[in-house]
Amino acid sequence: MKSGNEFETTELAAGLREKHRPEWGIVLGSGLGGFVDEFPHLYMLPYGKVPGLPLTTVPGHEGRFVFTESAGQRIMIAQGRVHLYEGWTARQVAAGVRFMAAAGVTKLILTNAAGAINPGFSPGSWMMIGDHINLTGVSPLTGGSSFFDMSEVYSPRLRAHFSKSAALEKITLYSGVYACVAGPQYETPAEVCMLGKLGADAVGMSTVAEAIQARALGIEVSAFSFLTNHAAGLGGKTLDHGEVLGMAKTGAAGFAGIIAGALGEAV
């Protein structure tokens, strides 16, 4: 494990490594917390029990770790996250990833709810992230000369396994570029038009800082966006967080199918 992880030597992380031995980590985005109901709960740890870990405040983010297993793989699920728009720094946003790494996680799956920019991508579907555009202007690595190659942030090996699993489950899984903005306001139609011209297929307000932090720790990363709506100016209606949460809840079961089908092979 690389240096710079404040959780690395804590007794809590060491105890989790010894007792639960999670290899996989999953971070659930807005409205996707119901994913944990698809698996047995072996142990639950509220974020408030982890000294130094920021607490979630946004509806749709439960704020706890759930330890479970599937296909013989041990999994540590972060049910909810914090965001830049809540006032946290990029390093604080990525604290959960550092704690998961300290607990033993070596492969990480990030999820989010996002707006679809690509006109060929239908709301209600999943998009596997192949690359990202960081438009927040910040990094969790700020404060040191941490130069990490970002050519393949999202593991081609894991993406191949998840694509195969989605095909077997007959679940539509797009692949595209995710643009991360700071929020909390949604994008204007002009901004969405700009993002499309930059090559983005979907837009959201999370995930990228966690992906950067995970790669800096040597963790293999994959990420998925549940497309809850068309981005501003593309769907003919205004955007509402409550509707985003409601739509995201429908995606949990399908995502569980993709994950469960791939975990046994992607070791």
Image (tube, helix red, strand yellow):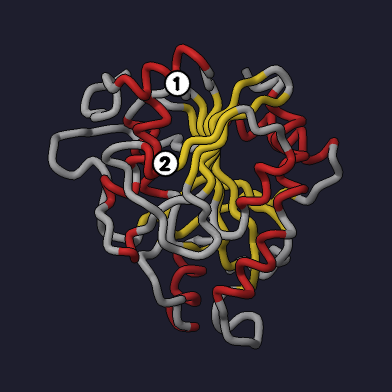
Residue 101 lies, in percent from the top left, at 40, 26
Name the quarter where the C terminus is drawn: top right
Residue found at x 26% / y 59%: 137
Q: Give residue 188's quadrant in the image.
A: bottom left
> Within 10 angstroms of label 2, few (less than 14), some, or many (20 or more) residues?
many
Q: Is mark 1 on a helix, strand or loop?
A: helix
Q: Please report whichever mark, 1 or 2, sits nearer to the chain's N-terminal start.
A: 1
Rendered image: mark on residue 211: 2
Residue 222, image quadrant: top right
Q: Residues within 10 Å of mark 1 (few under 14, many from 20)?
A: some
Please identify the residue farthest to the top as the structure is shown: 18
Q: Position of residue 45 (x, y in %)?
A: 48, 36
Q: Distance between the residues labelled 1 and 2?
A: 22 Å
Q: Residue at x 52, y 32 (%)?
A: 25
Q: What element carries label 2?
A: helix
Q: In this view, does 87 lie to the left or right of 61?
A: left
Tell me: 82 left or right of 72.
left
Residue 181 in view (yes/no): yes
Picture residue at 51% right of the left edge, 69% below the top: 196
| Amino acid type indicated by mark 1 | Leu
Residue 255 percent across, percent down from the top left: 71, 45
**Foreground residue among 108 and 10:** 10
Q: Is residue 29 left or right of residue 81?
A: right
Q: Which mark is residue 16?
A: 1
Q: Quadrant of the N terminus?
A: top left
Labelled disc at residue 71: none
**Looking at the image, is 248 positioned above or below residue 131?**
below
Mark 1 or 2: the one toward you:
1
Rendered residue at 74%/32% (across/down): 260
